[in-house]
Image (tube, rainbow, N blue to C red):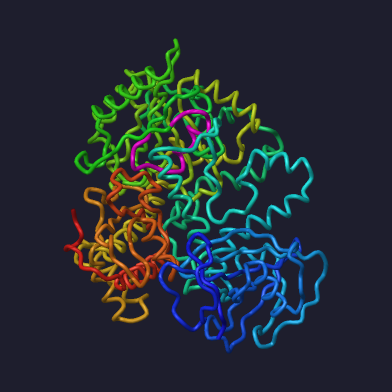
Amino acid sequence: MELWDLYDENGKLVQRGHPSDQPIPSGLYHLSIEVWPFDGQRFFLTRRAAEKSRYPGYWECIGGSALSGEDHIAAAIREVKEELGVCFPAKSFSVLAVETLDTHIVAVFLLMLGKEEHFSLSEREIAEGRWYSLQEMESLHLDTDFVPHQFSRYLKYVRKATFSSILERKPSSVKRLLSTHEELRVPKRGLPNSGRRPDGKPFHGMLKTINDAFGVYGDALYAKRTVLPESINNSLGGGSPLLFPPFPPAVNAIEQILQTTELSQYPFPAGDLNCRRTICAYLHQTGFSKKTTPENIILTESTTHAFHLILKMIIQPGDVILFTAPSYGLFAFEPERLGGNTRFLPLSADDNWLVDPQKLSKTIKNINKELMQQCRSDHPPRVAAFFQENPHNPTGKVMGPCHEALVKEIASVCREHGALLIDDLLYRDLCFDRDNLAIPAAHFDEEFQNVISVLGLSKAYGMAGIRAGFIVADEVLIRGLRDSIFQTIDSASHLSAVALAATFNDLPSRSAAYQTYFSELMDRYAFNLNLVIAAVEGISAVTSPYRQQVKDFVQSCCPSQEAAGLLLEGIPGVYFVPGSMPESGFFCLLDFTAYRGMRYEDTVIEDDKSLLIYLFSRYRVNFITGSAIGWPDPDRIIARISYSYEPEKIVRVFLYMKQELALLTRPFTERGEP
């Protein structure tokens, strides 16, 4: 038994000599310490003896409680001497943080080691010790048992301090860069940074919500030790399409050009003229205005690159780019990175998740009025463009032939308000109804000059890795885009141009290959979607011809017939967002709101973030949260699930999901529907 001193929350001494085996009175705390020995490149960590009552055999830094009469630094010096056999002076310790938690006031120290140290480890306390580099520390807790509360404080306090000490030894040129790029000081797990506004102001409103949501896909998620090892990928949150061979005509064209000398020459900034002529013929066949010429087409390094080029050219300071909510969240940052602003037009089930032209018109009008009042000048900012996805990501809604009047009205509203319409057609070829492919807004002659169309290879043709896209727009805009390409990357890849021309043309051979290719591809997607329907709503919700196929597949790949039966019952309280059953693409939207307020041990499901962290924390189940796609109703817990994965993985993940949701307790209404 030890004797401790007790303090109030302000650090004022209240009682001396409290026995450590006695409960600490409410509102009082004892001092404890954590010490991280660091030699400038590595940490020295120890593994707890197997006889320890708490966390036996776990790796840890040096830690312990202050004895009566000790302050934090005295306790740190003593604990290091007891465990490592070396007495370091107080000046070797730097306080990184003092944190009040439970019944502890914890001081976190960095112990700077000036030379190669030789330690004499306490056999009673320590099983072994070893050095860990900073790189090893990044994933140490994922591969070994590490005292969890210590590693959380490493991420919170120690990591930044140690990387900062290394940065002090960087050349002045790198330090100068870091002075304006604080985000580069510490490695970032998961998604890279979303960027920042040129004026230094933070993202706000819905965009801040999206940014915060994407921030979860870092230390908050991937720094967690899970039941399954890090090598197990149970994510249904990615954006890649189905694993499927590239479109055969594109493969043939690439193979042929590799046998020539064409790739030895630089292409032109706008892209090869013959390739653009070929693409133009395809556009005419597809329904684009006959006004379209090769001079209205420019080739890019992807549709993401295309979107960046477009916004860079059209945005003036303070201009607004209007997106739908929900939307593809990552695109929504681009306007603000370029000095503009991002606003959202909420979609709703009442409108079948389609754009209401009257609401669009009113929104643009109100934003323009607001901007004019804020900026008293001859050229105030305004809504520069409306970004439309057809088919839509993530709802999968398609505006095809039956919505021709709607597409026309949306385009007219934009033109009448002086806002360009950016028409993203990337998912067009992934429509389940092959007679209802999306109608391009550039189909209408009178709207053509105000529409910027974006197409590419990323989603539908098995060539996301090629990064190839193209823009169709008024020739004035194309001239500006051509200049931008020339001033940055000189020209887009000619290999990509060849793949684009072989994919998008009006040749009979292409048409035959297209029918064969998409017949198989869309059948695969339809099967996967019905697999998700069975896992969510039960096998009875699956219609023929897929019901028996899905049932047979689940029974063949589940670990037992009992597991197959459980999966095919569906998941109580989870349902597809009403009206959002996918018509295209490979995303579906699931509502988990029924689980709000339910708990497992210390975990309470409060929102989509806490649901994600809960499902990931054990079996690494991952998805994109509704907050990350700008879900318009913050009271709903929404998940965007991709069904572009192999069906065995879909079955596995939903089994884990159902298992984990079943552990949550608290009654909920039938199916949780509002």
Q: Give the quadrant of the N terminus.
A: bottom right
Q: Is residue 133 magenta?
A: no
Which residue is depicted at the point 63% across and 55% down? 160
Position above or below: 609 against 550: above
Q: Is 489 placed above or below 479 here?
A: below
Residue 336 forms part of the magenta stretch:
yes
Left or right: 539 in relation to 454: left
- Identified at 28% across, 37% down, the residue is 400
- Magenta range is 323-341
Q: Residue at x 46, y 56 (%)?
A: 244
Is 257 rendered above or below residue 614?
above
**Residue 275 seen in the current view:** no
Asked whether the viewer can see residue 325, the reply is: yes
Q: Residue furthest top?
A: 378
Does residue 382 appear to the left or right of 49 in the view shown?
left
Residue 511's quadrant in the figure? Answer: top left
Q: Position of residue 525 (x, y in %)?
A: 36, 56
Which image quarter: residue 565?
bottom left
Nearest the eye: 265 or 643 = 643
Extreme right residue here?
A: 115
Quadrant assignment, res 398: top left
